[in-house]
Image (cartoon, coloured by chain):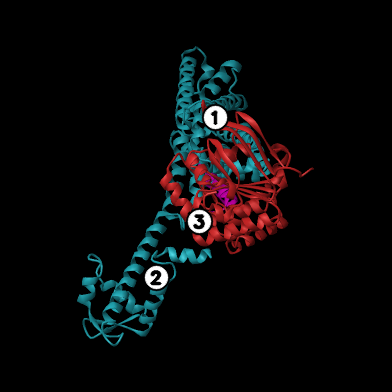
Chain colours: A cyan, B red
Amino acid sequence: MLELLFTDYTIRTVALGAAILGCVSGALGTFAVLREQSLLGDAVSHAALPGIVLAYMLTSSKASIVLMLGAGVFGALATGLVLSVTSQTRIKFDTALGIALSVFFGFGLVLLTFMQKRPDANQAGLETFLFGQAAALVSSDVITMAVIGLCAMIVTAFFWKEFKIASFDPDFGKTLGLRMNFVQGVLMVLFVLAIVIGLEAVGVVLMSALLIGPAAAARQWTDRLSLMFVLAAIIGAASGVTGALISSTGSALPTGPIIVLCAGVFVAISLLFAPRRGLTWRWLREWRNGHRLRMEAVLLDLYALASQHERPDYPHEAAVLDLMAHPITGSARSLTALEDRGLVARVGETQWSLTQAGVARVDAIVADRFEGGAMHGGKSVAIRHDT
Amino acid sequence: MSDAGFAVDVRDVTVAYREKPVLWDIDLEVAPGVLMAVVGPNGAGKTTLIKAILGLIKPAAGEVLIHGRPYSQQRHRVAYVPQRGSVDWDFPTNVLDVVTMGLYGKLGWVRRPTKQHKAVALEALRKVNMEAFASRQISQLSGGQQQRVFLARALVQEADVYFMDEPFQGVDAVTERSIIELLRALRAEGKTVVVVHHDLQTVPEYFDSVLLLNVRRIASGPVEDVFTEENLRVTYGGRVGFVKFVRQQSGVDNA
């Protein structure tokens, strides 16, 4: 399949188109996700359907620029409607979104069905806008997408710091004299553009996933906005290309769902395996913390026992330590781990005693827990960083 | 630009959410170089007043003058410290970057911060004892550290008037002390600082001047004249036991 990418002209066009749309929507999705407006993209893409059909009805042209224009106008209309309903009435954002999405989409379906009943052979193919058909992309489509995408990227580069503050703290930005309403308007227009260029290949139903998925995945890997933006673009492009190739070479599978599944795989991998934020990482850290705390507990128990005798290295039965330890995990594994670290020593078959290093460690633990920050355990450390 | 008169002059400001007034006909005059507390029960409109002054909420009526001219012409002389909880601290950015945002107004549209701007931000971080945290991801900060980052962001604005919304909210005693020292240093430079404050006990110790607010302005002026049991009772709606307790704790006799 891969060699087709370099030899087959059609495949190359399709892959290039999918790469561009994935790249642009993934990158801009960064701001949608951070501004908690991910679902706005869903309303935009669904609302685009009547725009597409109406554009065709008015012009009888299926040129992508014409259909994109119709989609863009209706997408922007839906966005404006949702935002003004939210600000002018008591209806909440999610409700306004749900209403706009379903009403516009319903209207689109009505128009589409109406068109299909007409004796017009040329209209065939409009229904592919539902789930997308990357195989239908021709080089003029790709050029249109590239130009729009490039414009969107240039605008983003220009307004980078304005977009950042509008996403992090718009009220503060406003007090600085930066016109946040204008910035947010520009962002909305870019979201609409990102959606519109993907509609032909991905379809109105699932396009918003390409806005959300790559950005959500990218957030897992980095704590820097610029890096998140670039990573989201790369993940978006990778999902786009993979999905488009699978759907246009093998079966007649619709492209949208395949691309979205690819993006889903990236999201799943990121949620599971990203360092620090990933679930695996967190489980590992919790397990390590638990292990460390159990070890410290056994060490302190041993110290408590020893302090009833003259010598700190007075040996004690493992069975006694087991009784004092956590009822399920017991003390055996903690003791072995402590022995590896040279903090305790085995005496005979079943007895254990503190080493000198062990006593020193107990002093350190006690100092950290009780003298550093009253009885607040882990918080004591934070307080000392504070001062 | 004449600086005669008041640093902050709020005239007849009324704010209503739908039909219900949340601020009713507020007049407030703050002299330059004053450290003022805004005090009142929950829902009294303290945050709303700050936001109305800063144009974040559109008042139904009234006007705001900063050093004698409308706020819209004096933005660059005003700095704002919002409530800590008003932003998403999981935003992918670091401490230095957040502080640099205080300079975006001076930078104007499109221009990017340079090394000099970063140096200014770093200097502000030093003033709040946070320079060691410059490259720290903001989600890893404690509440007190977040608050100091916000203060540093306001410091780089080099304003004449500072509005702070609950800067002592959820910070430990050490941070509280360092913040109040910072506020006093600002006052020593002749700056005006207006602070939404929750802890009545510390009002006489920390502030020279106080506004008692409960939808209406109950009283405003120097702490020793205005911070009386009678005024507090009116502000807090007759919870006398509570008010008396506060008076005893703060060690201020009836005026």
- Mark 2 or mark 1, which is nearer to you? 1
* Spatial CA span between label 2 and label 1: 51 Å
Q: Which residues are magenta?
A: A222-239
Which residue position is annotated with label 3?
Answer: B251
**Chain under disc 2:** A
Q: Residues within 10 Å of mark 3 (few under 14, many from 20)?
A: few
Q: What SS does tag 2 mark?
A: helix
Amino acid, disc 2: Phe
| Residue found farthest to the right | B1
**Chain under disc 3:** B
| Residue found farthest to the bottom | A310
Which residue position is annotated with label 1?
Answer: B16
Q: What SS does tag 1 mark?
A: strand
- Mark 2 or mark 3, which is nearer to you? 3
Up/down of B226 relative to A128, above or below: below
* Spatial CA span between label 3 and label 1: 37 Å
